[in-house]
Amino acid sequence: MSKSYNIAVIPGDGTGPEVTVEAVKVLKAAADKFGFKVDLTEYDFGGERYKKTGETLPDSAVEELKKCNSILLGAIGHPDVKPGILEKGILLKARFALDQYINLRPVKLYPGVPCPLKDKGPKEIDYVVIRENTGGLYTGCGGFSMKDTPEEVAVQSAVYNRHQVDRCLKYAFEYAKKYGKKARGVGEENTLALSGKTNVLTYLYDLWERGFNEMGEKEYPDIRRDYYHVDATCMWMVKNPEWFDVIVTGNMFGDIITDLGAMTQGGMGIAAGGNINPDGVSMFEPIGGSAPKYTGMGVINPLAAICSMQMMVQTLGEDAAAEKIEKAVKFVTGEKLESMQAGKMGYSTSGVGDLVAQAVAG
Ligand code: IPM
Ligand code: MN
């Protein structure tokens, strides 16, 4: 009997719905081709619903999401809603409530995609960032004191316990072992690099560094370990991206460096990500936002959403389908699109979705 997956779809705000439709189109083509079934349930969480009902992501919805196999998210963020409300109320709430403690963000330059880095191509830009996704500065520990006085103080702490660090490192080492450059036959060794700030954050990244070295020495002696300060990481991501294979880092640093990474792989139109709970329900979303100014125009690039869906398919264990979708995307970037930018692709949003879906079906 063929496998069947219950997928929750949250198209969200702005261009989220447009790109999600294309991701679903390709998902259905892959399901047909590779003989699995997808049962989709759509949820309308986002700015519009918030404006009407005041609701972001209700607890009852979290309970429903816990029962599905995976979640596909378009984008969250609405120009009429104060920044922070939807992000915290929907995106971060889902990440925390479903304990999606890994944010997996490939930095992969596909063929034909213009790269802003001089003399760098798909061979050089081919690594992943594993961002810890539920701790650190995102924990929400802090507050104000003496508010609205000249002496006002604000504190927001970066919090990690050893358990959080270790489970993230474990995922990262396992990932490097399975998908590192040696494992994929494109390099001499599998490398995991820790990106931190041990020269200043002498408590926080000391904890990470000890965990990293202890786990690496004991359990993964064959995986090469590198360490970079986060500022230097940014420098090398631009100057020598080929040095990287798998990077692991804390939540805030990971947020920042993956925007840089996204730019080096062709921009937000193509950058995909997954919020992963290795033992639970994961949620896949493009790194970019809801791009309100392009809403409804059919010009936004759906490849980031399609690539996020591809990561979902891989995480569900449908490896052959995932491989085919990636090939199809490479074909479309390499042979079809004129640009990755909204309005300049040479095709409409749905036109790009059609091209990928056809390539998957063919
Ligand atoms: C991201 C976003 C989010 C984050 C925001 C919207 C809360 O920037 O997914 O990278 O900071 O994690
Ligand atoms: Mn971000």
Image (spheres, grey):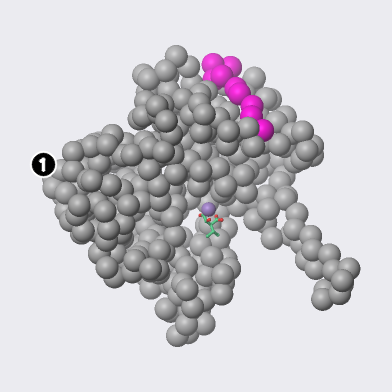
Predominant secondary structure in magenta?
Answer: strand
Along the horizontal axis of the image, is 325 left or right of 161?
Answer: left
- Where the C terminus falls, by quadrant? top left
Front residue of 216/152: it is 152
Which contiguous range is marked in magenta?
221-229
Q: Position of residue 192 (x, y in %)?
A: 55, 27
In the displayed structure, 319 sits above or below 16; it is above
Q: Position of residue 248 (x, y in %)?
A: 57, 36
Q: Which residue is mark 1?
A: 362
Question: What count of labels does the image hold?
Answer: 1
Amino acid type, residue under disc 1 in the picture? Gly
- The residue shown at (16%, 49%) is 355
Q: Position of residue 251 (x, y in %)?
A: 61, 47
Along the horizontal axis of the image, is 132 left or right of 344?
Answer: right
Along the horizontal axis of the image, is 39 left or right of 44?
Answer: left
Q: Position of residue 177 (x, y in %)?
A: 48, 25
SS for dot 1: loop
- Say which quarter of the image contains residue 106: top left
Residue 69 in sight? no
Q: Is residue 111 magenta?
A: no
Along the horizontal axis of the image, is 227 left or right of 297?
Answer: right
Q: Is residue 222 magenta?
A: yes
In the displayed structure, 320 sits above or below 285; it is above
In the displayed structure, 139 sits above or below 199; it is below
